[in-house]
Image: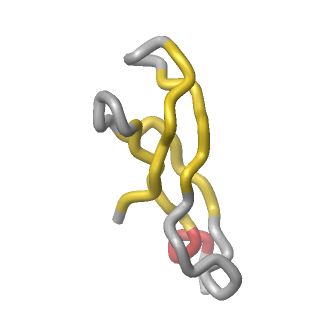
């Protein structure tokens, strides 16, 4: 499994822009990631959810 297979996109729940890419262990984490991250377009910390 390469790094490309482990990468997931994180999308801002307010402006729906993709601002982050991160790695995920898909064997251990079956649910989608939800992290509070800084969105540079909203200029505040918002919830970011994993997208396909």
User: Can you say whether 24 is above or below 33 in the image?
Assistant: below
Q: How many marks?
A: 0
Residue 48 lies left or right of residue 41; in this view the side is right
Residue 49 lies left or right of residue 13; in this view the side is right
Residue 47 horizontal/vertical position (percent): 50, 38
Residue at (40, 16) in percent of width and height: 42
Judging depth in this view, the residue of 5 and 28 nearest the camera is 28
Which residue is outermost to the left?
16
Residue 3 lies left or right of residue 10; in this view the side is right
User: Can you say whether 13 is above or below 33 in the image?
Assistant: above
Residue at (29, 37) in percent of width and height: 16
The colour scheme used to paint the residues is secondary structure
Image quarter where the N terminus lies is bottom right
Residue 10 horizontal/vertical position (percent): 47, 48
User: Can you say whether 12 is above or below 22 in the image?
Assistant: above
Residue at (61, 71) in percent of width and height: 3
Which residue is outermost to the top?
43
User: Can you say whether 27 is above or below 11 in the image?
Assistant: below
Residue at (48, 42) in percent of width and height: 48
Residue 30 horizontal/vertical position (percent): 56, 80
Q: Quadrant of residue 52?
A: bottom left
Residue 16 lies left or right of residue 7; in this view the side is left
Judging depth in this view, the residue of 5 and 14 nearest the camera is 14
Judging depth in this view, the residue of 28 and 23 nearest the camera is 28
Residue 25 horizontal/vertical position (percent): 67, 76
């Amino acid at each position: 499994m390469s790094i490309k297979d482990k990468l997931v996109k994180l999308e801002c729940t307010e402006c729906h822009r993709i601002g982050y890419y991160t790695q995920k262990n898909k064997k251990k984490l079956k649910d989608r990631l939800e992290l509070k991250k800084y969105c540079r377009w909203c200029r505040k910390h918002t919830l970011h959810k994993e997208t396909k």
